Amino acid sequence: MAVETQEVITGQKKKGSIIKNWSDKNESRIKEIRHSIRLFRKSPLAMLGLLIIVLFLLVAIFAPYIAPYGAEERNWKELKQAPGEKHIFGTDDTGGDIFSRILYGSRTSLYIGFSVVSVAIILGTLVGAISGYYGGKVDELMMRITDIFLAFPSLVLAMVICAFLGRSVENVMLAMTIVWWPAYARLVRGQALSIRERKYIEAARAIGASDFRIITKHLAPNSFSPIIVQATMDLGNVILVAAGLSFIGFGAKPGQAEWGRMISEGAAYMLNQPWMATFPGLAILIVCLGFNLFGDGLRDILDPRQRR
């Protein structure tokens, strides 16, 4: 028994020593994080944006438990019912509960937003880091390819791709990823062009670090601040554009719980039953506002002039 107690005490000491060593090693980083949190808490609009984002994420996760009706559930005896006690947001032209469909639609919209932005960041960071690090003909070739995508209006290019691939949420995500990655490639390239001349990059080359290690361990991580700000702002834009594509018939299929599709189905009844399009539109407005407010807060925090 005494031996086991001694082993437990020894293990706790080792664990405490590891934590202390890690804290000492990353003391400056911990101070930066704490300072960033203090700056963020001073911005009420940024806090409001974060609250909206967290609220919609929780709604998307727990939609099956919150929604009083199913996403595909219909009651043909209650078509186009006005908002009331039984249906707080009313019903649509097929008897579906609009409140429940908005809750389920948050899953689709947030899934599109996070998926498109995540893949665009990975692809754009890879292209931009390689282009900026190597320069010369590699940079020229990659940037001219990027310019081809940037030459077309993003919404028009996405519409063309969706028209070619067919109507589905997955095709909308693919089209928007193709449209969105060049912006990140340009952003990371600009960062890489300045970072590659710094002393720690030269030191890494001097000790024999491979190009892959320099790009993945030094260039890409040090470009993270502008990427995260851009990504936060883009999440709202992606959700808005995806809803627009669904509105004009390129995204979600008829009857699917998706905000843009719901607005499209309710637009024909806007004069007499405005709630059918108004509430999904308000959901898009609020979530986009949340991401924009949060992105503005992050931009102010990560701005070196604001951190003094």
Image: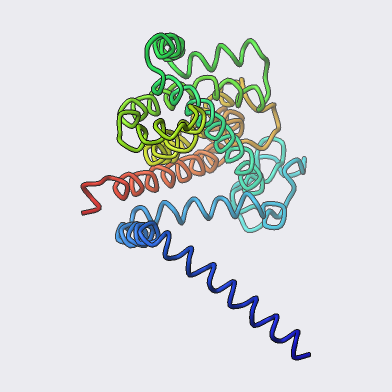
The image shows residue 239 at horizontal and vertical percentages of 52, 34
Quadrant showing the N terminus: bottom right
Q: Please give left or right for residue 136 compared with residue 177 in the image.
A: left
Identify which residue, 127 or 272, lies in the foreground: 127
The image shows residue 152 at horizontal and vertical percentages of 43, 11
- Residue at far bottom of view: 2
Scheme by which the image is coloured = rainbow
The image shows residue 130 at horizontal and vertical percentages of 46, 22
The structure residue drawn at horizontal position 36% and vertical position 36%, both measured from the top left corner, is: 203
Which of the 4 quarters of the picture holds residue 168? top right
Q: Please give left or right for residue 94 compared with residue 201 in the image.
A: right
Q: Please give left or right for residue 45 compared with residue 55 in the image.
A: left
Q: Is residue 219 above or below residue 11?
A: above
Quadrant showing the C terminus: bottom left
Identify which residue, 23 or 146, lies in the foreground: 23
Q: Is residue 297 above or below residue 6?
A: above
Which of the 4 quarters of the picture holds residue 35? bottom left
Identify which residue, 195 or 37, lies in the foreground: 195
Q: Please give left or right for residue 302 compared with residue 288 in the image.
A: left
The structure residue drawn at horizontal position 37% and vertical position 33%, both measured from the top left corner, is: 201
The image shows residue 103 at horizontal and vertical percentages of 63, 48
Q: Is residue 175 above or below residue 21?
A: above
Q: Tag count in the figure?
A: 0
Identify which residue, 131 or 13, lies in the foreground: 13
The structure residue drawn at horizontal position 62% and vertical position 35%, both measured from the top left corner, is: 258
